[in-house]
Image (cartoon, grey):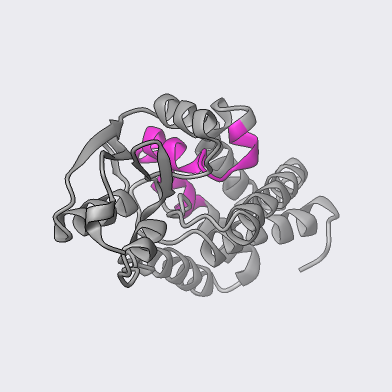
């Protein structure tokens, strides 16, 4: 499609001090490459993002408009202009560091390796979230179903996750930690499955903190799976 057919182009994207939408930046890069004039509208708070999504009935940002016609997101724009869709650079380094360190610590202790590995992993993931709770909550609300209904949960989750990890490391593991982990883990897995496989959202995972380039999917599902499995084991007092 010729760039000349696009007119009065409006780009709406998330642009917060602690989070710059990578797909919005890709859209800007493409529009500039094709020398298409556009107006860049910044959504600078989660409230603005939520209001925008509700107004236009869209699940994600950025969104590009040509006049009154909605083109869609970055991928839709690229397809319309006959351009190859460029992916965002993702990194699994933080995840490898967390799980690798947790495993080594558990092996060094020598006994109850599975229990210690799961406890250390959850505590480490919680620590990364606690370093910037606000940023984590802003990323978490994009896909977590409970946070979307109860926003305060996004800010409480890192602390709850830390308590779950400590409960797993306690000797013997605390029964209540098992039940809470099981409930939280199952709810989380449902949220990830819906976001990734049903809504097909291309989001960053908040599991290793809000400012991350780890893609939402298998990593966050694994985090919740660890909580669910370990929670089930502890809650029903299954012997390791």
Residue sitting at 15 percent across and 54 percent down? 32
Residue 136, image x, y percentages: 42, 40
Residues 8 and 220: in front is: 8
Percent position (x, y) of residue 100? 44, 71
Q: For the stretch drawn in magenta, what is the main secondary structure? A: helix
Is residue 141 shown in magenta?
A: yes
Which contiguous range is marked in magenta?
Answer: 123-148
Residue shown at 26% from the left, 62% from the top: 2
Near-viewer residue (229 or 66): 66
| Rendering coords of residue 98 (x, y %) | 43, 63
- Quarter of the picture containing the N terminus is bottom left
Percent position of residue 214, x then y: 40, 61
Instruction: Say which of 154 and 190 sits in front.
Output: 190
| Residue 112 can be seen, yes or no | no
Where 36 falls versus 19 (above or below)? Answer: below
Q: Residue at x 48, y 65 (%)?
A: 102
Residue 83 position by quadrant: bottom left
């Amino acid at each position: 499609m010729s760039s000349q057919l696009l007119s009065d182009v409006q780009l709406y994207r998330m642009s917060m001090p602690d989070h710059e939408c990578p797909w919005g930046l890709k859209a800007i890069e493409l529009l500039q490459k094709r020398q298409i004039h556009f107006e860049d509208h910044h959504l600078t708070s989660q409230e603005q993002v939520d209001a925008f999504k509700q107004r236009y009935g869209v699940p994600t940002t950025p969104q590009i408009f040509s006049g009154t016609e909605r083109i869609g997101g970055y991928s839709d724009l690229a397809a319309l202009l006959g351009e190859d869709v460029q992916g965002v650079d993702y990194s699994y380094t933080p995840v490898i560091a967390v799980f690798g360190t947790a495993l080594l610590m558990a092996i060094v202790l020598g006994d109850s390796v599975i229990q210690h590995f799961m406890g250390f992993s959850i505590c480490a993931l919680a620590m990364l979230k606690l370093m910037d709770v606000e940023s984590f909550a802003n990323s978490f609300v994009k896909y977590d179903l409970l946070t979307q209904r109860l926003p305060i949960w996004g800010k409480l989750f890192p602390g709850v996750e830390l308590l779950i990890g400590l409960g797993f490391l306690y000797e013997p593991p605390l029964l209540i930690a098992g039940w809470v982990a099981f409930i939280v883990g199952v709810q989380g897995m449902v949220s990830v499955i819906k976001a990734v496989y049903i809504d097909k959202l291309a989001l960053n995972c908040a599991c290793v903190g809000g400012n991350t380039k780890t893609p939402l999917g298998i990593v966050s599902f694994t985090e919740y799976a660890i909580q669910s499995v370990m929670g089930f084991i502890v809650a029903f007092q299954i012997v390791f």
